[in-house]
Amino acid sequence: MLVGVRGGFPLASVEASGDKSGLYVEVLEAIAAHADTSFDVQLLPFPRLRQYLKEGRLTAVLAVPNNAMLADSVAVGDVMEFDVVAVGRRGTRVRTLEELRGKKICLTRGSSLVPELYADKRFLLKEVSNHDSCPKMLDAGRVDFIISLPIGLAHLLPRMGKTPADFGEPYLIKRVPVQLLVSRWHANQTTVQTLRMALERAKGAGSIASIQSRYEKAAQ
């Protein structure tokens, strides 16, 4: 079963050995174990996840979906949740999303994290294919704020030689669900039901919560 995820450390990456690792990879392995099957995990930029899901080139995706993804798929269920934050330059502090109007904001192209940003032209969006570029652009002063998952940011900053103190205070915008979605091309009753049962069993066993907790602790 071909399953797509957004590539990027710590969610999913390819090791020097060629093996795939990361939070999403381990979560999918836990679900697959309860489905008595295996997943061929494909790492893709976010825009391609939607395209390949729509075309049926992927059986499923694990992602924070946008509305277009939801329209092209059948939802198996919520797998976990992530916080979404806005982070600015050192010394910045915001308390509402409206305070970001007129500011240059970096986020992943087609991002589903904060769809409200696309509905208001006063938010000056700078979209990138690789979200790892956003903290670097913020550090270089090319943007004013970034939209990010704290778990990803916490793992990336040490690789940049930075700490949270080098940036502004994070503003918690919302929590979003990560969902397992099956392409409508592959959404027969057997596949969807098998995955739903496997997901519920993996969650019931505490496997997914344990994996997420381990990655969150490693980022502290």
Image (tube, helix red, strand yellow):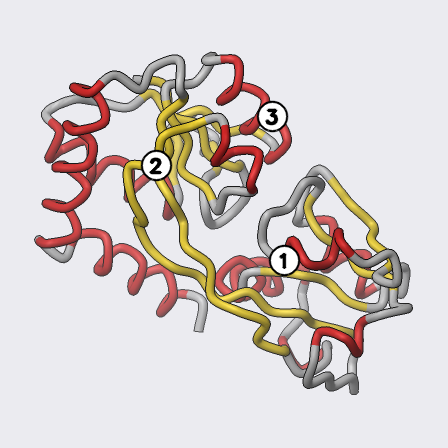
Instruction: From the image, tell me which residue sits under label 2.
Output: 75
Q: Residues within 10 Å of mark 2 (few under 14, many from 20)?
A: many
Amino acid at pointer 1: Val
- State which tag comes first along the sequence, 2 or 3: 3
Amino acid at pointer 3: Arg
Instruction: From the image, tell me which residue sits under label 1.
Output: 114
- State which tag comes first along the sequence, 1 or 3: 3
Residue 102 to residue 3: above or below = below
Instruction: From the image, tell me which residue sits under label 3.
Output: 48
How far apart are the alpha carbons under marks 1 and 2?
A: 20 Å
Residue 136 horizontal side relative to residue 86, left or right: right
| Callout 2: SS | strand
Residue 190 place in picture, x, y as percent: 16, 19
Q: Residues within 10 Å of mark 1 (few under 14, many from 20)?
A: some
Pick the residue in front: 208 or 8. Answer: 208
Residue 210 horizontal side relative to residue 68, left or right: left
Residue 195 place in picture, x, y as percent: 20, 31
How far apart are the alpha carbons under marks 1 and 3?
A: 19 Å
Residue 68 horizontal side relative to residue 30, left or right: right
How far apart are the alpha carbons under marks 2 and 3?
A: 18 Å
